[in-house]
């Protein structure tokens, strides 16, 4: 772990280097927003199953393959990975990683719209708001220290 990362996350290594120990509050906001985004995506998936809008073993009417499920898993791993990235990455790379990944998720989700269920479209619009919050927080962030 680099000294900058140790300082950012408030580890003992950061304290040993004579730095102030503590987590930058914006990192916590970013991590929380990524958690919220992941839960919105999961809620949409669960509601789609229970509403009958999903056909088991098919995506958009196409029989699924293991490669399609792998791609779906990797897409869902993005916000999960970004939680850790938000807590462990130095400020400048984190700022631009957050902006790029958030914007890419918005573009990706726009290609899937509209969904048959109103709930799904509303959840995606809410997710766009969370992505906007992530981008705004990252660009407005003035890291401590």
Image (tube, rainbow, N blue to C red):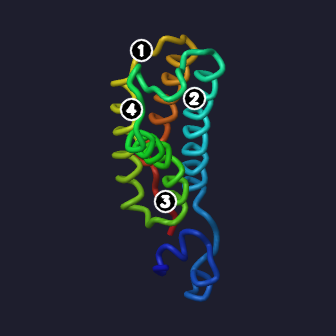
Q: In this view, does 48 lie to the left or right of 70?
A: right
**Is mark 4 in CB contact (under 8 Å) with mark 2?**
no
Q: SS class of the residue under badge 1?
A: loop
Q: Is residue 133 left or right of residue 40?
A: left
Whole-percent x, y for residue 99 in the image: 37, 45
Whether residue 5 is situated above or below residue 46 in the rendered picture = below
Q: Which tag, 4 or 2, sits closer to the chain's start?
A: 2
The foreground one among 145 and 40 is 40
**Is mark 2 in CB contact (under 8 Å) with mark 1?**
no
Q: Crowding at label 2, few (<14), some or many (≥20) Cα neighbours within 10 Å? A: some
Distance from Cα at disc 1 to Cα at disc 3? 31 Å
Q: Crowding at label 1, few (<14), some or many (≥20) Cα neighbours within 10 Å? A: few
Whether residue 22 is situated above or below residue 114 in the rendered picture = below
- The residue that mark 1 highlights is 114
For the question of whether residue 62 can be seen, the reply is yes
Q: Which tag, 1 or 3, sits closer to the chain's start?
A: 3
Whether residue 83 is situated above or below residue 34 in the rendered picture = below
- The residue that mark 4 highlights is 106
Distance from Cα at disc 2 to Cα at disc 1? 15 Å
- The residue that mark 3 highlights is 85
User: Of tags 1 and 4, which is closer to the observer?
Assistant: 1
Whole-percent x, y for residue 114 in the image: 41, 14
Whole-percent x, y for residue 39 in the image: 61, 37
Q: SS class of the residue under badge 2?
A: helix
Q: Crowding at label 3, few (<14), some or many (≥20) Cα neighbours within 10 Å? A: some
The foreground one among 92 and 110 is 110
Distance from Cα at disc 2 to Cα at disc 3? 24 Å
Q: Is residue 112 left or right of residue 7?
A: left
For the question of whether residue 136 can be seen, the reply is no
């Amino acid at each position: 772990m680099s000294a900058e990362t140790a300082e950012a996350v408030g580890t003992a290594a950061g304290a040993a280097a004579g730095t102030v120990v503590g987590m930058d509050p914006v990192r916590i906001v970013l991590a929380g927003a990524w958690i919220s985004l992941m839960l919105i995506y999961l809620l949409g998936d669960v509601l789609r199953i229970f509403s009958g809008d999903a056909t088991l073993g098919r995506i958009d009417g196409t029989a699924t393959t293991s490669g399609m499920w792998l791609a779906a898993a990797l897409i869902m791993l993005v916000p999960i990975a970004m939680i850790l990235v938000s807590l462990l990455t130095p400020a400048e790379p984190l700022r631009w990683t957050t902006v790029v990944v958030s914007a890419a998720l918005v573009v990706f989700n726009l290609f899937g719209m509209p969904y048959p269920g109103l709930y799904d479209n509303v959840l995606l619009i809410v997710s766009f708001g969370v992505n906007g919050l992530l981008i705004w927080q990252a660009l407005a962030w003035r890291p401590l220290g």
